[in-house]
């Protein structure tokens, strides 16, 4: 399937193409083991029934997909990066190349939706959230994994890590990771400047139609997990 990419989509595709082959390893290493823990907690608390059909959006190499496959009947992986999605497909995922703003899927198709590290790339996150809502059945559940921005005494340490250590890690992890490192900190800052607190994030989800919105900020605020339900 081909898809038209907006400039922000092209940025994401260009970022991830060079790191697809070693993404799983270095995403765990550079997050000091927190990224796998966040994904596992999100899936654990999602509450999707064992007979559910689940859509994993921004699936990348399929890290969340594989967690879901151990729990539910069917998982479909969707991503805009052909390179990342090829890694998921090689491991047995049912893969769709598309963007979250324009899902090539019928209304009310899925019992649950998951996504990770998605909304920061979008100029209008509400468009994607409404699309996710559209393809869910009434009563369906949704979960998200995202980076957080710590507050208080942890903010300066986080700033040093994202602005200095992550870009420097490219020397070991590979050149593509250097670019990701330079991009990540400002991207997180821009997102949380826009959605500065829990209520702003919850309001975004509620404006798309979701209810029972819940948030968690693990790892001293370095992660952000969210869940909700379609009424």
Image: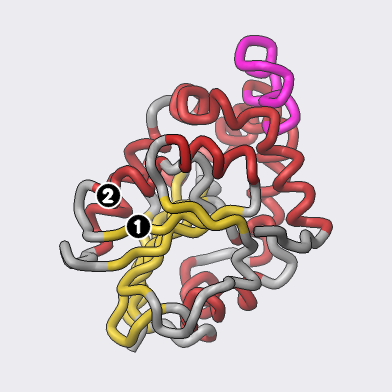
Q: Which residue is mark 2?
A: 69
Q: Is residue 228 above or below residue 82?
A: below
Residue 33 coordinates in the image, percent (x, y): 38, 28
Q: Residues within 10 Å of mark 2 (few under 14, many from 20)?
A: some
Residue 155 coordinates in the image, percent (x, y): 56, 40
Q: Main secondary structure of the magenta part?
A: helix
Q: Which residue is mark 1?
A: 75
The residue lying at 42 percent from left, 37 percent from top is: 35
Query: Magenta segment, which residues?
Result: 166-180
Element carrying mark 2 = helix
Element carrying mark 1 = strand
Residue 209 coordinates in the image, percent (x, y): 46, 87
The numbered mark, 1 or 2, whose residue comes first in the sequence reads 2
Residue 4 coordinates in the image, percent (x, y): 77, 63
Total numbered circles = 2
Image quadrant for the N terminus? bottom right
């Amino acid at each position: 399937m081909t898809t038209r990419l907006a400039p922000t989509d092209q940025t994401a595709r260009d970022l991830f193409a060079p790191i697809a082959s070693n993404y799983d390893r270095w995403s765990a290493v550079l997050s000091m083991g927190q990224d796998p823990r966040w994904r596992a907690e999100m899936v654990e608390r999602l509450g999707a029934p064992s007979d559910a059909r689940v859509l994993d959006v921004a699936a990348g190499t399929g890290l969340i997909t594989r967690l879901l496959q151990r729990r539910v009947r069917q998982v479909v992986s969707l991503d805009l990066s052909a390179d990342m999605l090829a890694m998921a497909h090689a491991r047995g995922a049912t893969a769709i190349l598309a963007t979250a703003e324009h899902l090539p899927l019928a209304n009310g198709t899925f019992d649950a939706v998951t996504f990770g590290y998605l909304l920061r790339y979008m100029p209008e996150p509400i468009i994607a959230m409404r699309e996710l809502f559209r393809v869910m059945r009434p009563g369906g559940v949704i979960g998200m994994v995202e980076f957080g921005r710590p507050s208080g005494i942890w903010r300066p340490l986080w700033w040093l890590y994202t602005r200095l250590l992550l870009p420097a890690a490219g020397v070991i992890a590979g050149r593509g990771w250097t670019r990701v490192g330079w991009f990540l900190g400002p991207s997180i800052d821009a997102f949380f400047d826009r959605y500065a607190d829990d209520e702003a994030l919850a309001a975004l989800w509620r404006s798309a139609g979701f209810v029972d919105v819940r948030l968690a900020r693990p790892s001293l605020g370095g992660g952000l997990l969210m869940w909700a339900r379609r009424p």
